[in-house]
Image: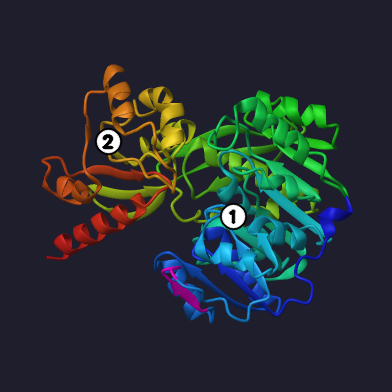
Amino acid sequence: MAAFYQDLIGSSKYAYLIGIGGIGMSALARVLKYLGLQIAGSDSKESLTTRQLTQDGIPVYIGQNQITFEGADLIIYSSAIAADHLELRTAREMGLRVYHRAEVLSSLFNRAKTSIAVTGTHGKTTTSGMVSFILSELGKNPTCLVGGVIKNLGSNTLLGDPDLWVSEVDESDKSHELYAPSYAVITNLEEDHLDFYRDLKDLETSFSKFLKNPIDPGVVIYSDDDPTLKQVVLESGKPRISFGLSPKADFYAENIRLDSFGSEFDFVEAGLYATRIKLSVPGIHNVANALAALTLLIQLGLDPDEMREPLFLFGGAGRRLEVKWNSEGLVIIDDYAHHPTEVRASISALRRMGDHVTVVFQPHRFSRTQHFFKEFGTAFQDADELILTEVYSAGEKNPEKIGVDLIYQEVAQNGHPDVRVVDKNEITSYLLNRNHSKGIVAFLGAGDIGDIADEFTNRFKSLAAA
């Protein structure tokens, strides 16, 4: 267990982050700067995140085609950085101290007196965002790292007490196995990241390893609605508390009412009514996320009634059913959904916002497309119109020539009445020129489809102003 608490920062004065523009890397950069280190980093291209880091006093070198870490005594990289990356390879050849992002983050996280790890296949960004925002609003001064921008705070990071730590913990590359939290919140467990895992059983085995780590008190908060996850948690032997959408769970929701931009429900504890919760984020999946947050925070001694207002005020995380434009007749949504289960959940929520739902979907990774194309074939059934565009590679090679046509053919064979493939650069023009212009237009995917959402929104605003 001692390895979990190894101090990887040590006497380091200057940390350089390769791929600093990533959501997780930028959060770690801010935390390390807060702890007193000199920070700089590089990224392949300029982005809103790199510009914000620069404004925050963290130099960012764009291009990654030369060595710019002179003087750094600690090099940190993410899973997105290949082993033969110029800076990473050079740093190792020079004998510098080089660590993966998760190694450094977990070494800080595991030393906190109270540490909360939020992980799972879906919902971890929103759940960790809810936990972070409620703790902040109630004056608990947490340190938080979330995998998306909390809209209420305008950041993915809260810099506070290092002994009360909340982290969204990524399971995509088994790095969650490095964390030894006081409380582990697991939202669900479903087959994904099959570029890294062999199958669902391999993913279950990895979570079984993770569940050996929680200590002091080592409580696991988990979804009772997920039978796979439930079995893994039961086998762990850890202290456990469940949440869910049925009375089988320790904490559950009753009398749920969903509306266009939110929901409300009775929060029930061990069969006893606790309070009525109202959310400003839509969808039944966000009811589940709120249940996870409430269940966890009750373990920390918070009262459900004092959490009602912060939960209602919580505006969600960036690219999680984020409303880019809302006017009479048209709502533009940007959403991170990239797994068939997430797509179904998002479209279900979208259906309550408008009469006509147009979905623009960018598949994420060739490996995910190859594995899930049949599931994607039925995931869009509740969308009135579906626009598909080319696969976002996320750096993957494509020797088997996997393309968006796999999904298109499956959707068409399942009888969808209106599906087409449109080049990414032509999506905005297509949407502006089509006959139907009212209802919901939602951009879904984990790649750069959010840029097209912004482009369409800005073009529509200009036309509306004219």
| Kind of element beneath mark 1 | helix
In this rendering, does residue 122 appear at all?
Answer: yes
Q: Residue at x 34, y 33 (%)?
A: 401
Q: Quadrant of residue 381?
A: top left
Residue 54 position within the rendered picture, expressed as x and y whole percent measured from the top left: 48, 78
276 w.r.t. 129: above or below: above
**In which quadrant of the rendered view does residue 132 lie?**
bottom right
Categorize mark 2 by other alpha carbons within 10 Å: few (<14), some (14-19), many (20+): few
Dot 1 crowding, Cα within 10 Å, few <14, some 14–19, many 20+: many
Q: Is residue 62 magenta?
A: yes
Residue 221 to residue 191: above or below? below
Magenta stretch encompasses residue 15: no
Give the mark count.
2
Q: Looking at numbered disc 1 in the image, what kind of residue is underneath it?
A: Gly
Q: Residue at x 26, y 31 (%)?
A: 384
Counting residues from the N terminus, which is met first, the one under dot 1 or under dot 2? 1
Q: Which residues are magenta?
A: 59-65
Camera-near label (1 vs 2) is 1
Depicted 329 relative to depicted 208: above or below: below
In the rendering, at what x and y percent does residue 87 appear? 54, 66
One can see residue 313 in this view? no
Residue 401 relative to residue 130: left or right = left
Closer-to-camera residue (337/94): 94
Three-letter code, disc 2:
Asp
Q: Nearer the viewer, residue 61 or 338?
A: 61
Q: Which mark is residue 355?
A: 2
Q: Which residue is painted at 71% across and 25% down in the image?
A: 248
Marks 1 and 2, Cα distance to the nearest angstrom? 30 Å
Tag shown at residue 129: 1
Above or below, comparing residue 114 to residue 422 in the picture: below
